[in-house]
Amino acid sequence: MSEFDKLHPAIQHHIVNSLGWPGLRPLQESTIQPVLNGEHAILLAPTAGGKTEAASFPVFSRMLSENWNGLSVLYICPIKALLNNLEERLSYYGHLLGRRVEVWHGDISASRKAKITSEPPDILLTTPESLEVMLVSGRIDQRSLFANVNSVIIDEVHAFAGDDRGWHLLSVLERISVIAGRELQRLGLSATVGNPDLLCDWLASACQARRSVINPPAENNVIPDIQVDWVGSIRNAALVISRLHRGEKRLVFVDSRSRVEELSMELRALGVATYVSHSCLSLEERRSAEEAFSQGSDCVIVATSTLELGIDVGDLDRVIQIDSPFTVASFLQRIGRTGRRAGSSRNCLFLATKEDAFLRALALLHLWKKEFVEPIVPPPRPMHIFAQQVLALTLQEDGIIQQDVGKWIGNMPGFSGIPEEEKEYLVSYMLSTGILHSDSGILGIGRAGEKSFGQKNFMELFSVFTSPPMVKVFHGKQELGEVHQLTFAVKEEGPALLTLGGRSWQTKYIDWPRRKAYVEPTDQRGRSQWISAGQPMHYEMCQAISEILSSENIPEGLSQRSKTLLEELKEEFDWVDASNSTLLIDSDRNVHWWTFSGKLLNAALSESLIGEADNVSSDNLCISFSHVYDVESLVSKIKEIMEDDEIRVLLSLEEDFIQELKFSECLPQSEIDREILARYSVDKNLERLRCLRLSVLRVV
């Protein structure tokens, strides 16, 4: 019997007759038996590799064969746009089989949500935050709604596992499992991950059923077309895009919302049909842009990583990357948007506007050719998420005794490794500060908890990430999106000007209490602000830059301009040796320690060496010391750090890239410090750096 023959006959019929498919892809074939067996699994395949069908077809098969009724499957995505994108496809499959699919997130109307709870669908597409809302809502009968859940599909699972949303997701699944009275089958879908076995163990956590990674050989072994060009500015990038690949559909990735807007304005000024997509545009603006682009032919859509996660914008011809993403995983997601059409191949054109981004692009491609993908590392010690879950459980259960908390979330791997006395101490702290109160041993939310989280029906409890202060922007009654409040800083020369959706706007009026701004079109060029902390580059990426600079080889796919720039950089950095970290000392007592180790380790090393110079600063590649008081003493201290394995260096908790812990008011300061230090440990990278030889060069 073939794998296909193991599916329910109704699904076999519709795959052949309704969908007209000649057969299944390797991943789809390989997934059938494990899913039918009830196993937990990670499904790996490139973008557009058929992962959704690989998971959903055998789950539908179980639904029919085992006569699942009511809400039996949860399909979880990291962003609302992906849910909206999947709804039509999964609803069609469900319709063929007589099953209903619905979507639930923050943009769904109250009336539609009421219908979902009164008449549950067979499959619900949602987010972890929306599941939390359902679990704590006093208007929903959680035990009735979730009683029949058997299986959970998590799309883009790597997007959850690397941060606190992953711990939140697993906690919510544990609570639903308790309500359902069974272990939920967990299926994670991912295109890019460097440590799939660890990711699978993270997802299945304490579950008893067998778990597996399903990763068949790639179907398409055609070598992608990768080109790198040096253009030097956003304006020049727009000029190149306007002249290249005319008549084709081009998706352009830019890694900041401000530069997305800037490039869009430049392209429109050159007469290019340009659409815009980023997370701070309104839902209507994003949808209209993505739909118009999907139906067009000679056009460009400029986007941040919002279009990285499998959202369908039609059949693309080209992917263009302005500068470079910071990870190989992101690159794989982006290049995977191309090459879907028969006879086409995957492609990506890098247009570098800055020298550091140019080197990062070359380093990224160097790692990609070595088949390196960054491992997913769940953040350690999520005690602030434990505090959030205790608060959520008091709402869900209308009060809970402390001993029952473990019944609901004790098996979640982020919590199970933390000693019980530490969790008990945290609950005691929350009681002492009034965040919790106890009535005859029943925990509830105290006055301080109500003040911190009770606004707007505890909306602050439902998500585990922090948001900067934003202002919604309106043209008449149409919502355009939102920008950081600093965009509207008072200017003496007139009203604030901004760009949003690739268009210029002039501020008419700001309603600060409601955080709304009303604007009208203008021909003057503005600029919007969005505040985000840039994350340190991976150690491997920084070391790859060292390898690029020290190698005599010129990588393939470089334009003549890129080759010229690379040769100039190699000449400028002719002292770089990939087996060394190098101290450059000049005659003015300035010292530069080129570690190529990433901002994380360099910032910690800088902290250990403060006091040796007038100023100490660091970036991803180098630590700089201005006007060193005693050069020989500094060199001696650096050698001591490099040679003594007993010496540890710790990161300052004041670094701007350290992300704030939401719900930190629930934690004593000692726990906040402990958690952050655990999350930003530099021990592993320091050990790697110590394996390199320290070279000291005096520059005249």
Image (spheres, grey):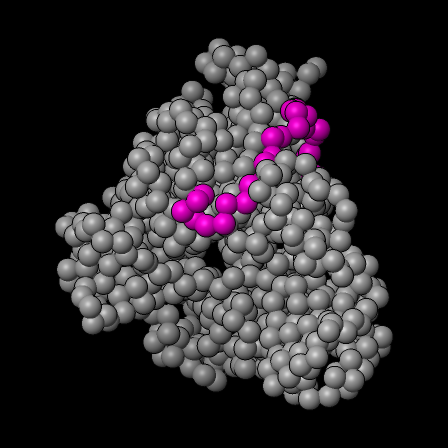
Q: In the image, residue 312 lies at what x, y percent? A: 44, 32
Q: In the image, residue 440 lies at what x, y percent? A: 45, 79
Residue 689 to residue 549: above or below? below
The residue at the point 66 percent across, 28 percent down is 223
Q: Which residues are magenta?
A: 211-237
Q: In the image, residue 216 lies at what x, y percent? A: 70, 30
Residue 313 to residue 497: above or below? above
Seen in the image, is 414 located left or right of residue 515? right
Seen in the image, is 266 located left or right of residue 586? left
Seen in the image, is 302 located left or right of residue 455? right
Give yes or no for residue 220 being in the magenta stretch: yes
Q: In which quadrant will I find the C terminus? A: bottom right
Residue 436 to residue 101: above or below? below
654, 190: nearer the viewer? 654
Q: In which quadrant will I find the N terminus? A: top right
111, 403: nearer the viewer? 111
Give yes or no for residue 552 being in the magenta stretch: no
The residue at the point 45 percent across, 83 percent down is 433
Q: In the image, residue 553 lies at what x, y percent? A: 75, 43
